[in-house]
Image (cartoon, coloured by chain):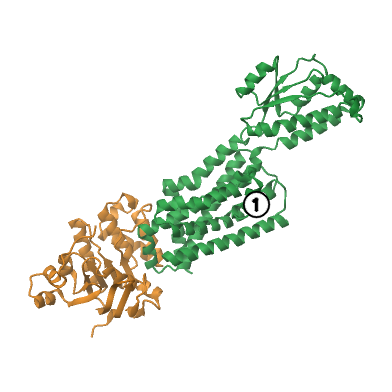
Chain colours: A orange, B green
Amino acid sequence: MIESAIELKHLEKQYRDVKAVDDLSLQVGKGELFGLLGPNGAGKTTIISILCGLIKPSSGSATVCGYDVQKEPTKVKEKIGVCIQETAVYPFLTGAENVDLFGNLNSMNNETLKSRKNLLLDKMGLAEDAKRKADKYSGGMKRRLSLILALIHDPEIAFLDEPTVAMDPQSRHAVWDFVKDLKTQGKTVVLTTHYMEEAQELCDRVGIIDNGKLIALGTPKELIAKNGVGNLEEVFIKLTGKKMREEL
Amino acid sequence: MNFQRILALSKKDLKKTVREPAVLFMIFLFPIIFVTAFGASFGGAGSGQTIYNIGVVNDLPSGGSSQQFLSALNETKILNLQTYVSNQTAQADLSQGKVQAVMVIPSEFAQSLASYQASPNNPSQWVNSSISLYLDKGSLVATQAVPPIVQQVLAKFSSASAQPVLSSLRLETASLVEVKTTPSLDFIAPGMFTFASIFLIMLVGQSFAQDRENGMMKRIRISPTTPTEFMASQVLSYMVIALVQAALVFIMVYALGFKPNVGIPSYAFTFVLVMAFSLSNVGFGLITATIAKSPGAATGIAFLFVIPQLFLGTFVGASLSAGAKVAGQFVPSYYVTDALTSLFLRGAAITSTTILIDFGVVSASCIAILAIGITLYSKYFKI
C-alpha cells in the first residue's frame, strides 16, 4: 500500500448556510501528482486553505505528512509549499529579494538558499530579470515568481492553486515542465486547475469536487473509460453539468 | 523565536520605506519639510531672534527724556524703531504691515516722568499721560510680544532713571532681553520629535491593509513564521524607522538653531522615548488596519488617530485652550512632548519625578495600545 502524504477524513467546512466542504475523505500518496478539479466555488481553495492551516474545518480531520493540520500547524507549514491563487509578490523588492525573503522565512541557510534560488530562477526563465523590481514584471513573470516563492525551500508537498491561470502558452508550458520535474524528484503535488488538458497531461489521479463533495476519483484514463467519453473535460461536464470557465 | 525570520521581515519593511516614494515622503520627507518650514517661520533660522519694527511718532525735542526712553527701547535689540513725523503716515504703514506697531509719545511725557521721579510714592502729585500703542492685528506674535516689552522697558526706564548707577539699568535691560529672545523654535522643538513619529500610524495601517489585499499576508501566514515573530519584526522595523526619524528631526532643528544645554544622556533618553512612543503608533496603525477594508480607507481612518495626537500632544497644541490641554492628557504624544519640554527647556534631570512619570505613562499606554492593536487585528484577520 502506498504511504499517504495527505489524508482527509470526513472533512467538513460550513460557512453560515453554505457547506463549502461536505464529508470529504481522501488520501494522496507520497510522490503522487494529484489534481483537484471543480467549477468555481466548488470548494477546492477551501480544501487547500484547510490543509495549509489558514482556516479551521468545522468537523473531520486532515493530516499532512502525518501531522494534524489543527494540532501541529507549524510542523505542517515546514513540510509544505503553497502557490496561492493571488499573484502575491512584493512589488518594491526585486525578484531575487522576494526569493531571499521567503527562503529566510523558511529558515534556509545562505548557501542552500543561494544555489536553489539560482536554480529556480533559471528554470522559470527569470534569471536575467532577477535584479529588477517585481513591479516591472509582466503578469506571467509575477506568477512564475510566485511559484518560486512557494517552492524555494524544497518542500515535500506542493499545493499549486491555479498556477497557470492567465498565463501565456510559453509560461504555461514552462510551469508544466517544472511540475513534471517536481514529480520526478519524488515530491507530492496537489494541483487545482480549470484547464482539463493540464490535468490530463500532468496528473496521476484526479478528484472532481462539486458543491464541496467528491463526486469522482481516479486516474484520467480510468475516469474517461468509466464515463465512455473522449477526454477529461467531457468527464467533467458529464458529471457536473457545468462548463468550466475562467475566474475573472 | 526565529531571528532569521524577524530580521528578514524587518529588512523587507525598511526597504519598502526607502523604495516606495509615497512612504518615503510620508515618513521622512514630509516631517523634515514641515519641521524646516515651521522652524524657519518661527524664528529658527538666521539669528534666532525676532525683531519687531515699531513706528514712533515723537515730536518732542531731541535730547529729552523721551529720546532716552527710545534709546532704552533700542537697547533691547528686539525693537527696531522707525521715526515718523505724523501719526497718519505711521498708521498707513501699520495698515500695510510695514511696521508691527505704532507708538505715539504724548507731549506730556517729560512732565509726567519728572512728576513721578519727584514724588514716586505720591500718585496725587503725578501728571498722568499715556503712550498710545497701535498694534498690527494681523500678527498674533506681535500683539502678544510687543506690549509687554514696551511696558517693561517703560517701567525699568522710569524707575532706573532715578537711580544714580547707570550699570543697574543696563543689567536689568539685559535680563529682559535674555528672557524675550528665546527663539520660538526652542518652544516647539520638543513637539517636533513627537510630530514626526505620529505618521507611522498611517504607514502601518496602509501597509497591513495593502498586504492583506494583495495576498502577501496570506503568503506569510502559510510560511512557518509565527504570529509572535511577525509582530516582533513589525515592532523592530518601525522602531528603527522612528529612530531614523528622530535623528533627522534632531539634525534639522539643530541646524535651525535648537541647541539645548543638555548632555548626551538626555539626547539618548529622547531617542528611547520616541522609540517607545512609536509602539503606540504601531498599535494605532493595527487598529486602523482592522477597521479599514483597503489601503485607501486606511489613509482616511488613520487621521482619526493622527489628528488628536497632533493637535493635543505636539507643538501644535502649545496655544490651545485649557480644555484642550486637559483633553491632551488622554493622548500619549502629550507625555512625550511634556517630557522633552521638561528635559530641554526646563532643565529637568532624566531622573526627575516629572520625566519619570511621563516616561511611565508613555511606556504603559504604548504597551496597552500595541496589545489592543495586535488583539483586534488577530481577532478579525489573523496574523
Residue B220: image x %, image y %?
A: 39, 64
Residue in the picture at 22% in, 73% down? A34
Which quadrant would residue B378 be assigned to in this image?
A: bottom left
Q: Quadrant of the C terminus of chain A?
A: bottom left
Residue in the picture at 80% in, 28% down? B154
B241 left or right, relative to B46: left
Residue in the picture at 65% in, 26% down? B100
Residue in the picture at 71% in, 35% down? B181
Q: Quadrant of the N terminus of chain A?
A: bottom left
Residue lying farthest front?
A: B124
Q: Chain of mark 1?
A: B
B182 left or right, relative to B377: right
Kindly identify which residue carries mark 1: B326
Residue B249: image x %, image y %?
A: 57, 45
- Residue B164 visible somewhere in the drawing: no
- Eyeballing the image, is B199 above or below A213? above
What SS does tag 1 mark? helix
The kind of residue tagged 1 is Val
- Eyeballing the image, is B124 above or below B228? above
